[in-house]
Amino acid sequence: MPADNPGNPGIRATDANRADVSSALDKALDEGQIDRFEHLERVRTATRARHVSELRPLLADLQGVSVDLPGDPSPKRRKSAAEPTHHDDSSPTARRAVIFGLLTVVAVGALGLSTLFNSDDPEPASPPSAIEQVDDSSGSDGSDDSDSDAVVLDNPSPLTLEGLEAMFSSASEASGTEFATRMTAHPEHGGMEWVDPEHPSRSWSSSFRGGWDAPDDRTSSRDESFRIADLDAAMIAPIIAGAPETLHVPNGEPSHMIIEADEEGMPVYSVFARNDVHQSGHMTVNHAGDVLSMYPADR
């Protein structure tokens, strides 16, 4: 980290610098590196920062959320192995090698065109994309059903009523418990964490993309748990949908939601919204939909 010169207050921070750091802090909150109170304090500091030197400490202890700020050392340019090496092609041997190479390219190209127009074999099919499931209806005798089509998976977003209902209704079966310490919802995926009932020193986490994947274990933070049955998709879905307007985020979209437990073990929903120019806001509501706190974009 470059040190500021004595008597020089340092490089002035721009709105873009402050917005980039705030977005990085949003990511750290979503990943569980900081809690919502730390997030709030750091975002407040970022939005009030006058100099770049005030922004760097806000990210110094976080993983994978680095931001390029003015004054940071630039990595030295390394010569890529793909960069061409210049050779002296003025010698007769070099010229002969070039001519031979051109003739080879022409011959191979002609052979390829001949094969293309004369072959009776169909073109090989492109592999299906990651969001496609191909219905393999060919029989054991190798016959192919030409009427079968690729089925494109169209799972509802976990930030919609349909997506939330799918997440909430399947969470207990996926985790094998009625309680969770944390749930998250993003436009394309969700997540859940819960304490291992048999080994309280451990917890588990699982991701949701239309269905829950195999859980990963981790050291338990022993956070308060809420009952999955107390989650209310019908209550929180319209709050999520209206968050950009409520939080005064122009042309914004809901970005994510975090669910944790309050002191009474009831779910508390933190809803975030942002737009393409890094304006963001968030609000917290309790299990009944009452607003506990609100931090609009124009605060």
Image (spheres, rainbow, N blue to C red):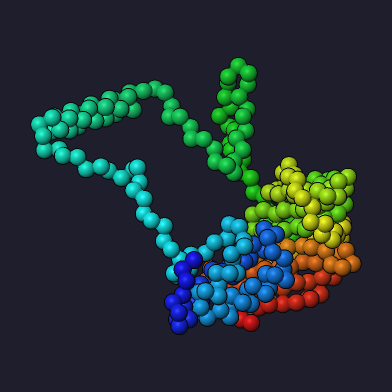
Q: What residue appears at the point 61 percent right and 38 percent down from the top-left corner?
A: 133
**Residue 174: horizontal and vertical position, in percent?**
80, 45
Which quadrant: the C terminus?
Answer: bottom right
**Residue 18: horizontal and vertical position, in percent?**
54, 74
Q: Is residue 40 above or below residue 116?
A: below
Q: What residue appears at the point 72 percent right and 58 percent down from the top-left corner?
A: 184
Residue 242 visible within the image:
no
Kindly give the residue lying farthest to the front in the view shown. Answer: 6
Q: What residue appears at the point 69 percent right and 64 percent down from the top-left corner?
A: 34
**Residue 265: horizontal and vertical position, in percent?**
88, 63
Q: Is residue 139 left or right of residue 193?
A: left
Q: How many marks?
A: 0
Kindly give the residue lying farthest to the top in the view shown. Answer: 141
| Residue nearest the viewer, comparing 48 with 235 | 48
Residue 53 visible within the image:
yes
Q: Is residue 191 above or below residue 1?
A: above
Q: Is residue 268 left or right of residue 271?
A: right
Q: In the rendered image, which quarter is residue 137 located in?
A: top right
**Residue 161: horizontal and vertical position, in percent?**
74, 60
| Residue nearest the viewer, comparing 122 with 276 | 276
Q: Is residue 157 left or right of residue 19?
A: right
Q: Is residue 198 above or below residue 270?
A: above
Q: What residue appears at the point 80 percent right and 67 percent down from the top-left corner?
A: 268
Q: In the rendered image, which quarter is residue 5 located in?
A: bottom left
Q: Is residue 191 left or right of residue 111?
A: right
